[in-house]
Image (cartoon, rainbow, N blue to C red):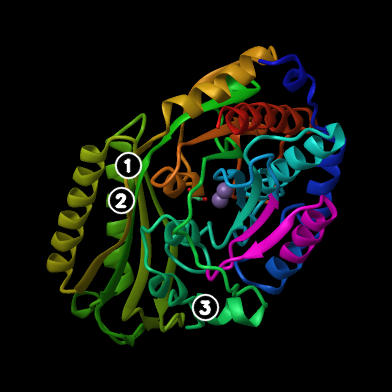
Amino acid sequence: MEPVVQNLKVNADRLWDSLMEMAKIGATPKGGVCRLALSDEDKAARDLFVRWCKEAGCTVSVDAMGNIFGRRKGKNDKLPPIMSGSHIDSQPTGGKFDGIYGVMAGLEVIRALNDAGFETEAPIEVVCWTNEEGSRFAPAMTASGVFAGEFTLDYGLSRPDKDGKTLGEELRRIGYAGDMACGGRKVGAFFEAHIEQGPILEADKKTIGVVQGVQGIRWYELNVTGMEAHAGTTPMRRRKDALVGVARMVSEAHRIGMAQLPFGRSTVGMMQVKPNSRNTIPGHVFFTVDLRHPDAETLVGMGKAFQQSCEAIAQETGLTLDFKEIWYSPPVKFDAACVRAVENAASNLGMAHEPIISGAGHDAVYLSRVAPTAMVFIPCEDGISHNEIEAATKTDCGAGAQVLLQAMVERANAA
Ligand code: GLV
Ligand code: MN
Ligand code: MN
């Protein structure tokens, strides 16, 4: 590493203060945040991000999917930008770090370059991607997916929430339906910093996870229909209780995840029971399933096994089953040179690091289709995430941003 580059330093206190300021927006009583995509809280956090980008001297632009880009000029501004960022939206009971850490770390890189008066060859951009979580609008990583050409713009804008409001309508409502085209431009490289969201780095006492790739994810939506009837008068053998069938399907999903230890994952995270009345037999259940595995073939097998089990259960219980796969994000292997840039940065900085595979989905998954991509992980307390108690230390947040800075500058100057 060049000595001048080695001297570039992020300011961990400033990064931490920005994270804590952002955490006030949508703050929940248990210390987390609820900042659902395109809610008023998401808008408020976006407004603050835009203000900070402008204060850092960036040009700000917003694309048709509401992705926000803060750009710091390069010496050669015609070169494609070296980009970093993540998401501002959160889970309903989310933490203070998932997503927003990557956006603030990207901004801190720009602030640190400003402090040093350091000009990179290629421009540097910090980005906030719309609707990464997929909690309000399925699927996850929607807007980075449109940017990378995985989804059409129409598909992205037409995603509905549970009340039937579309992503596009809500973007307009909060004033973030931008006029720039989504995607179709060259990105020199993409680096995303994120908390690990799992227990590995903490257990191994490592500060930095050099992310090699991301496991595959399949999302399913199931509608199971039986018949509503009186809870007191309908004999047990005459019932078509949708929830009783679904209980067995949930148990099958769990069994299929357990059958693929140590890597398999299966989750039923959302369920709607109708009519949801204590003395009426449930006539209809909607529920979602999230299956994951780093090996694509194994994941296909898990999906098939689950579908077969559900079909058999529906037949035995006289229920009607509508089984849909709504999203597939294949396992991803990141760009070798970008991964090496992260590893070199951690090594040169003397930080304990190790290779790691991401269990969570990230915008970097789709960016990797259009740009050389890598990720930097930092530990989080007890490996807990998607929970209000999610926690990371100021030191680790600073360390991750420092690695990001070094990797991005190396790349920006190699251009
Ligand atoms: C994103 O948070 C995911 O579900 O992995
Ligand atoms: Mn995230
Ligand atoms: Mn998340």
Residue 145 image offset from top left, x and y in percent: 43, 57
Query: Pointer 2: what residue?
Result: 253
Query: Pointer 1: what residue?
Result: 257
Q: Which of 118 and 89 is in front in this view?
A: 118
Near mark 3 (Cα within 10 A), the count class, few <14, some 14-19 or many ≥20, is many
Q: Can residue 169 be seen from the camera position used here?
A: yes
Left or right: residue 108 versus residue 259 is: right
- Residue 55: in magenta span: yes
Do tag 2 and tag 1 residues touch (Cβ < 8 Å)?
A: yes
Question: Which residue: 29% across, 44% down?
Answer: 255
On screen, 117 above or below 329?
above
Left or right: residue 127 versus residue 291 is: right
Q: Give the range drawn in magenta.
A: 46-71
Query: Pointer 3: what residue?
Result: 168
Kind of residue at disc 1? Gly
Residue 112 image offset from top left, x and y in percent: 80, 35
Q: Nearer the viewer, residue 299 or 157?
A: 157
Residue 315 image offset from top left, x and y in percent: 12, 67
Question: Which residue: 44% across, 66% down?
Answer: 138
Near mark 1 (Cα within 10 A), the count class, few <14, some 14-19 or many ≥20, is many
Near mark 2 (Cα within 10 A), the count class, few <14, some 14-19 or many ≥20, is many
